[in-house]
Image (cartoon, coloured by chain):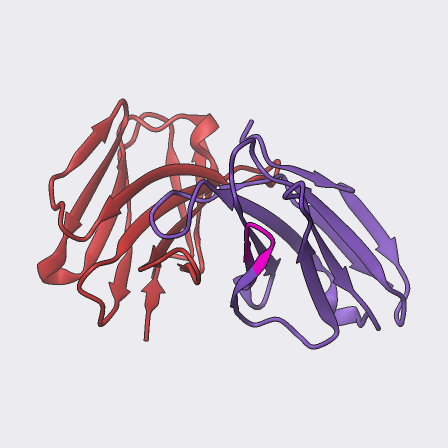
Amino acid sequence: DSGVTQTPKHLITATGQRVTLRCSPRSGDLSVYWYQQSLDQGLQFLIQYYNGEERAKGNILERFSAQQFPDLHSELNLSSLELGDSALYFCASSSRTGLSPLHFGNGTRLTVT
Amino acid sequence: AQKVTQAQTEISVVEKEDVTLDCVYETRDTTYYLFWYKQPPSGELVFLIRRNSFDEQNEISGRYSWNFQKSTSSFNFTITASQVVDSAVYFCALTYNNNDMRFGAGTRLTVKP
């Protein structure tokens, strides 16, 4: 058990809808990362937060947004969903920026129909 | 630009065979970190090892061993006496600051009884 909690485990929704994925990092970890894993793109970095502030952005679409709250949990919001957004979304946390390994949650599997 | 190549898409071995998973990376950074992660059929990503660019010592952990060679930009992973429970997708990853960890495409290892 990595200590990173993601909810929900599975999500099925229709095109055009909006969903929110939630992540609780390991106790004490200040950094939260979001990754998307799809069959054709592999594991892609989306965005990172550190202690409530956005730290880095990767291949995140404008339809997607995230935030990290004062209690350090994070939410990834996906809107105007398309079929191609179907993927496994991982949250990871690390104790500080730079050098600590990322510890991943079990992921949220999103299916857009 | 940073890039990780795992040329082996799928490997199948019989239990107790040794198997080596290849990882070749590209980076212009002089300080960087390499990782291996395991993704079993259940879907979670499990951290296995981190190696920094200044430490070329090989590492052994039980049946797992890692061979880091800067001269060939490789960070290969060997499983000795493979077991069915080793069946998973293995990812090699590279980062210089954790903000944008680049993952290889993964190697699916199947260990048959």
Identity of the residue furthest to the top in this view: B62
| Residue occupying image coordinates x 28% and y 25% | B63
Identity of the residue furthest to the left in this view: B71
Percent coordinates x, y for residue A79 in the rendering: 81, 69
| Residue occupying image coordinates x 61% and y 50% | A90
- Residue A71 seen in the figure: yes
Asked if the stretch drawn in magenta spans residue A26, the answer is no
Residue bounds of the magenta highlight = A49-53
- In the visual, does B14 lie left or right of B65? right
Percent coordinates x, y for residue A18 in the rendering: 86, 64
- In the visual, does B67 lie left or right of B7? left
**Chain B drawn colour:** red
- In the visual, does A67 lie left or right of A43? right
Q: Which quadrant of the rendered structure holds the C terminus of chain B?
A: top left
- Residue B88 seen in the figure: no
| Residue occupying image coordinates x 33% and y 64% | B5
Percent coordinates x, y for residue B53 in the rendering: 18, 53
- In the visual, does B31 lie left or right of B49? left
**Res B55 → quadrant:** top left
| Residue occupying image coordinates x 42% and y 38% | B47
> What secondary structure do most residues of the magenta stretch adopt?
strand
Percent coordinates x, y for residue A102 in the rendering: 45, 44
**Chain A drawn colour:** purple
Asked if the stretch drawn in magenta spans residue A51, the answer is yes
Q: Which quadrant of the rendered structure holds the N terminus of chain B?
A: bottom left
Along the viewing direction, whichever of A98 and B49 lies nearer the viewer: A98
Residue B68 vs B18, above or below: the answer is: below
Residue B75 vs A43, above or below: the answer is: above
Q: So how many labels did they put on this image?
A: 0
